[in-house]
Image (cartoon, rainbow, N blue to C red):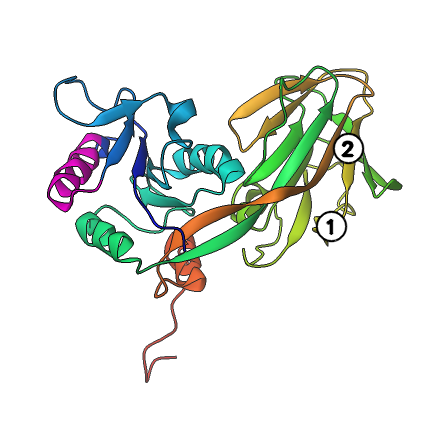
Amino acid sequence: MTEIKRIGIIANHRRPDAQEAIDRVHRWAEPNKWPVVFTEGLSDDPNSGPVTIAREKLQKKVDIVIAFGGDGTILSAVRSASPLEIPVLGINLGSLGFLAELGPDNLEKTLDRIKKGDYTIETRMLLFPIVKGDCLAEPMPAFNDVVIDKGSIVRVIQLDLYVNDEFVSSYAGDGLIVATPTGSTAYSMAVGGPIIHPSLEAIIVSPIAPHTLAQRPMVFSAEDQLQIVMASKRVASVTIDGQVACTLQHQESVVINRAPIDARLIRFSKNSYYKLLRDKLGWGFKPAAGQK
């Protein structure tokens, strides 16, 4: 396990508890003599003490990143940190928080555990979409999903799916979601895709509002190469993790492979993925003894 010498902090300013959590990290760091680097804008007082740095440079200066916010904040942090193999700890300040490991209640104890090395590193596969055309300035990994949809237009689009250069099917509808196992509990689940344990390695393709019920979600090997071609004579939208978007023209395509890097998340051993599903999705709990 890599020795941690400096922690980086990313936070969603719009969350009402974000500043309080940041202040708690700062108060913990001073007596523990552990440098903490904050992204710019996390403190309104330039004389308050924390070292600040531009967000795009943060991952090059720290050994781990703690992301305060909802899943969107954690997704953004993971995309930035993964190419440098820097682990991310998500602290949930939102409502659902599938990607967060903990809430802010025991923040100081969590920092103590990190300092002692009392944690594990969990790897999660990423997708690497390459858009053929002028869509993205540079490729970037996707932690949850790559979505190709009709965007703001009201008519359906047709997308052709190829796997390892073999034609699979044409999809007429609102679009396709290509998801990782981590992203199986996000948009893909909302359109009827399967939930896949994040330790597995697979690629899920889920159609969005298909015009035929025969077209169902499919699961492919993580080693497969997927290509999605925009067959309609109109413009589609390509979105990575619900945050980075661009347009796809007629006959342009998106090629999606497993990324050569993995996401690295800080985990604490007692937390269960199945308990997370029960808590976040409101699944029924096992009846108490004597109850039917």
Does dot 1 land on a helix, a strand or a loop?
loop
Q: Pointer 2: residues within 10 angstroms few (<14), some, or many (20+)? A: many
Task: Give the number of the mark in front: 1 or 2.
Answer: 1
* Nearer to me, 70 or 169: 70
Residue interval drawn in magenta: 19-34
Reading the image, the residue beneath label 1 is 223
Is residue 29 part of the magenta span, yes or no? yes
Asked where in the image residue 231 lies, by quadrant, the reply is top right
Find residue 109 and report its horizontal and vertical position in percent.
Answer: 19, 54
In the rendered view, tell whether residue 200 sits above or below residue 170. Answer: below
The amino acid type, in three-letter code, at marker 2 is Ile
The span from disc 1 to disc 2 (Cα, nearest Å) is 16 Å
Left or right of 162: which side holds 20? Answer: left
Task: Kindly report the secondary structure that dominates the magenta region of the rendered protein.
Answer: helix
| Residue 264 visible | yes
Find residue 276 and report its horizontal and vertical position in percent.
Answer: 40, 57
Left or right of 99: which side holds 144? Answer: right
| Residue 14 visible | no
Q: Residue at x 53, y 30 (%)?
A: 242
Left or right of 162: which side holds 3? Answer: left
In the rendered view, tell whether residue 69 sits above or below residue 134. Answer: below
Reading the image, the residue beneath label 2 is 228
Find residue 168 and report its horizontal and vertical position in percent.
Answer: 85, 43
The amino acid type, in three-letter code, at marker 1 is Glu
